[in-house]
Image (cartoon, rainbow, N blue to C red):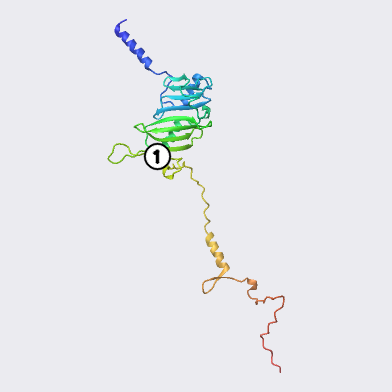
């Protein structure tokens, strides 16, 4: 075998070892990573998840880490990762029971909002708040003492500083909390000044961030029925027919026709009939 041919084979073997596994993909979302763990290690491996973490997402990370409850582990937990070469079982992590107590447990089947959807929600919140970021850190944990998964997303700028944090329900997609860090740089100085913190859960109104507008809803297209033409004219005509205008221009109700020519009748007082009216016709002279 000639030397050049042997060199080519050596380079080819080294290049093949450097290639990732065929089933691995970069920038995988949380559901893709979890599916890889389930397919390799069993469908019940993520029934009691403590947390799922990933860093450096742009927007999705390269490696996901899962920690689950394991009664046979020395620390009570078990650690899995999913990256370019697929899923890996790392056994018991160093930190766990009794030094580090899990806040809660959740089943991966209850996660309806994956990291792709969580990124879109966090990006929309940052855009409304005028916050620029370069990468994201993802952490999916159960709310303290419950089995409800919640996304905790940290937004980082080009200097790897956290400029915002958004908490999102992983079951409903509701934004539970928004925290923004607005860096202030004094004039004439390169060092950053005191940052202004905005927290949606803060009881101080001055620290509350701007509230995003509600989602757009379809406009109510039900129009009121227009008033029929001529209704106003007919109404005015009826008023003119039922009233009479005096010299002063005031409206005076007309008396009913059947009583218009009759003489007024005096009302009885206390049951006593009034005296008869005198006859205005003068008596005829007696011859």
Q: Which one is in front, 59 or 47? A: 47
Left/right of residue 21 with respect to residue 266 in the rendered view? left
Name the residue tied to disc 1.
197
Q: Which one is in front, 79 or 22? A: 79
Q: Residue at x 33, y 13 (%)?
A: 11
* Place of residue 218 in the rendered image (x, y in percent of width and height, measured from the top left): 48, 43
Q: Quadrant of residue 276?
A: bottom right
Q: Farthest residue to the top: give it.
A: 1
Q: Determine whether 115 is above or below 266 in the image.
A: above
Q: Quadrant of residue 21?
A: top left
Residue 114 visible, this orientation = no
Q: Quadrant of residue 259?
A: bottom right
Left/right of residue 14 with respect to residue 213 in the rendered view? left
Q: Farthest residue to the front: give it.
A: 99
Q: Residue at x 41, y 30 (%)?
A: 137
Left/right of residue 143 with respect to residue 191 in the rendered view? right
Q: Quadrant of the N terminus?
A: top left
Q: Which one is in front, 199 or 148? A: 199
* Place of residue 94 in the rendered image (x, y in percent of width and height, measured from the top left): 46, 22
Q: Determine whether 269 is above or below 144 in the image.
A: below
Secondary structure beneath label 1? strand
Q: Quadrant of the C terminus?
A: bottom right
Q: Residues within 10 Å of mark 1 (few under 14, many from 20)?
A: some
Q: Farthest residue to the left: give it.
A: 188
Q: Residue at x 55, y 62 (%)?
A: 235
Residue 239 visible, this orientation = yes
Q: Farthest residue to the bottom: give it.
A: 287
* Place of residue 117 in the rendered image (x, y in percent of width and height, measured from the top left): 45, 32
* Place of residue 154 in the rendered image (x, y in percent of width and height, measured from the top left): 41, 33
- The total of numbered circles placed on residues is 1
């Amino acid at each position: 075998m000639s030397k050049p041919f042997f060199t080519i084979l050596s380079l080819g073997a080294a290049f093949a070892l450097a290639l990732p596994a065929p089933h691995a993909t970069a920038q995988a979302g949380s559901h893709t990573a979890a599916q890889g763990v389930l397919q390799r290690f069993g469908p019940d491996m993520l029934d009691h998840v403590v947390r799922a973490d990933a860093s450096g997402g742009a927007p999705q990370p390269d490696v996901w880490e899962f920690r689950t409850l394991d009664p046979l582990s020395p620390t009570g937990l078990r650690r899995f990762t999913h990256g370019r070469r697929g899923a890996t079982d790392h056994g018991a992590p160093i930190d766990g029971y009794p030094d580090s107590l899990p806040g809660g447990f959740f089943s991966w089947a209850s996660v309806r909002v994956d990291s792709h959807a969580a990124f879109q929600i966090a990006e929309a919140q940052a855009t409304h708040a005028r916050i620029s970021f370069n990468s994201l850190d993802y952490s999916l944990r159960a709310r303290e003492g419950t089995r409800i998964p919640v996304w905790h997303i940290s937004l980082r700028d080009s200097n790897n500083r956290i400029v915002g944090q958004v908490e999102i329900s992983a079951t409903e997609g509701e934004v539970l909390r928004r925290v923004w860090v607005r860096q202030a740089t004094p004039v004439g100085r390169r060092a950053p000044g005191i940052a202004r913190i905005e927290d949606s859960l803060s009881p101080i109104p001055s620290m509350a961030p701007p509230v995003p507008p509600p989602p757009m809803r379809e406009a109510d297209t039900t129009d009121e029925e227009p008033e029929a033409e001529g209704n106003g004219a007919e109404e005015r005509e009826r008023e003119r027919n039922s009233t009479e205008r005096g010299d002063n221009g005031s409206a005076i109700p007309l008396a009913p026709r059947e009583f218009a020519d009759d003489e007024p009748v005096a009302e009885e007082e206390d049951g006593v009939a009034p005296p008869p009216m005198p006859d205005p016709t003068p008596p005829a002279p007696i011859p």
